[in-house]
Image: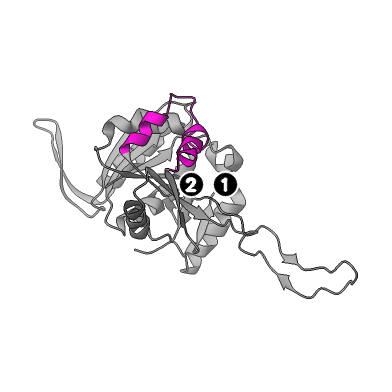
Amino acid sequence: MQVMILAGGFGTRISEESAMKPKPMVEIGGRPILWHIMKSYLAHGLSDFVICCGYKGHMIRQYFHDYALASADVRFDMRDNTMTLLRTATEPWRITLVETGLDTMTGGRIRRAAEYLDDGPFCCTYGDGVSDVDITSVIEFHRTRGRLATVTAVQPPGRFGVFELHADDDRVPSFTEKPQGDGAWINGGFFVLERSVIEMIDGDDTVWEREPLERLASAGQLSAYRHHGFWHPMDTLRDKQLLESMWESGRAPWKKW
């Protein structure tokens, strides 16, 4: 099964980093968060990636070019002006980098890159969040439900400590520092989609999370896989610093490889 990764957005909420590089190339532990996401999929046996590029996409192309070269034995033959990678220690990835436009919306990016997809179902996710979600289980869940699309539902991490407070008493009976959200479920990405969902995307201006997902839900064709484990986006510099501290501690929850 192939994996499509949406990696073309501007990343304006983390402009401290994205002014210089595309958001998926912001590093955690010296590697782009895109690399971490791909390693997570590889841990479940998925190695064929279609990456939707846009903003500063040339930096993503350059990264994978250099990544392959840096870990390989190389022969340069100046007689016929050729270069041969003799042996490499890189992951067994097959990566298709697709230029999907600078201002294209998420749905439009999926539609533009669809020509590089096989006929069967495929995984799809964003290039700016990590999780310890069991991708194998998400795929199996999708297959057993028999619907066109499955989204991984997550409960976002809380930003602030919360406590109970009785209306007629100033005593605090309980306090929880940064609880796991407020009980609401949100779109955590890590989709599994049937190829036919592409037909629900009208063009470049289509936002995947609006009309297509709304239509799928209305038609009873959208399933939700509830993930109760770790999930964290990298929307802000604060998020990056938190994920970096987890990695440096040796206890990054998403590292399953």
Q: Secondary structure at mark 1?
A: loop
**The stretch drawn in magenta includes residue 77:** no
Q: Is residue 232 in view from this perspective?
A: yes
Provide the residue span drawn in magenta: 195-220
Residue 64 rendering spot, x and y as whole percentages: 32, 42
**Sooner in the amino-acid sequence: mark 1 or mark 2:** 2
- The amino acid pointed to by label 2 is Asp
Vertical placement of residue 113 versus 23, above or below:
above
Name the quadrant containing residue 121. top left
Q: Pointer 2: what residue?
A: 128
Give the residue at x 71% y 64%: 161
Give the residue at x 27% y 56%: 45
Give the residue at x 89% y 71%: 170
Residue closer to the observer: 31 or 118: 118
Residue 35 rendering spot, x and y as whole percentages: 38, 50
Residue closer to the observer: 91 or 141: 141
Q: Quadrant of the C terminus?
A: bottom left
User: In the current view of this chain or complex, which residue is farthest to the front?
Assistant: 219
- The amino acid pointed to by label 1 is Asp
**The stretch drawn in magenta includes residue 217:** yes
Residue 119 rendering spot, x and y as whole percentages: 24, 37
Vertical placement of residue 171 versus 32, above or below:
below
Vertical placement of residue 150 versus 242, above or below:
above
Q: Which mark is residue 235?
A: 1
